[in-house]
Structure formats: C-alpha cells, structure tokens
Image (tube, helix red, strand yellow):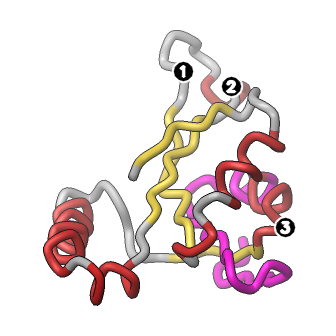
Amino acid sequence: MKVRYDTRCYVTYVCTFIASLEHDGLIAFLDSARNRRHLNLCSMSSNYTIFVVAAEHYKIADTLIYRETMQHLLDYQSECVIRPRISAIFGLHRVNDAFKYYMRVPSGQVLIDMKNCNRLTLCDER
C-alpha cells in the first residue's frame, strides 16, 4: 500500500493512520517528492511515501500476495526507486521525531517500529 502524506496535514491524522496498521510492524518512509513549480525546493515541505509490508503475516496467510510484494520490492530496488539503506528506526511514540529527522537527513530511509513504540536506533548519523 502506498500513501502520500503532505506535512501540512495534522500529525494526529498520520498517527491515527499508522496506528490502524499496527499489525504490520514496520513502516518505511521511502523518499520525498518536492513541488517542482518552485525554484527553491529546499523551502518546500516534503511529501512522504509510506510503503507498508506485513511480510511475516502474508508469508503464511496469502503466499501469492507475499510473492507479489517481494517481487515489487525487488523491482523497486532494481529501478533504483528504493535503496536498501536504513538511516534510523523510530518507535510509533516517536513519529514526530522521525519526521524531524527525515527533514534533516532526507536521503536516508526511516522506519517506524509499530511493536516497540519507544524505539530509537540511529544507524546513519550525519
């Protein structure tokens, strides 16, 4: 599932959305899109693409969805749409910190851990 999130929206909306996906475990903030109509792209707020995969759930419950999802991930990686590098992992209770970190380190991938809500792991400090 892919969802666009505009940072101008309320963070509580995102928290509610993320909480509804709790069984999925981790949510990856894959990249950002900028508003190309403005020359100064750095001053514009980012849009976030959220890609949620419940791999362990689908591996048993629906092997077809599991295989298709894994194939999509491999396709995204081969097209250089995603990079297999994680900069940080934040727990659900630290989602605001995750957004702030992502704005500071936009090239890194940030994961939200749904099961360990207070987690904070910085893998790639810049």
Disc 1 residue type?
Answer: Asn
Query: Would you say the residues marked 1 and 2 are in contact, meaning their CB atoms lie under 8 Å apart?
Result: yes
Considering the numbered disc 2 on the image, is that residue within a helix, a strand or a loop?
loop
Query: Residue lying furthest front in this view?
Result: 61
Residue numbers of the magenta segment:
100-126
> Magenta stretch: residue 109 in it?
yes
Q: CA distance from mark 3 to mark 2?
A: 23 Å
3 or 2: tag closer to the N-terminus: 2
The label nearer to you, 3 versus 2, is 3
Of the 4 image quadrants, the one containing the C terminus is bottom right
Give the mark nearer the N terminus: 1 vs 2: 1
- Residue at 46% across, 63% down: 52
Give the structural element (helix, strand or loop) at label 1.
loop
Q: CA distance from mark 3 to mark 1?
A: 27 Å
Q: Position of residue 84 (x, y in %)?
A: 39, 76
SS for dot 3: helix
Which of pointers 3 and 1 lies earlier in the amino acid sequence?
A: 1
Residue assigned mark 3? 94
Nearer to us in this view, 126 or 72: 72
Q: Is 6 within the magenta?
A: no
Q: Is residue 56 left or right of residue 40?
A: left
**Which residue corresponds to mark 1?**
35
Report x, y in % for residue 65: 21, 69
Question: On the rendered structure, is 81 left or right of 2?
Answer: left
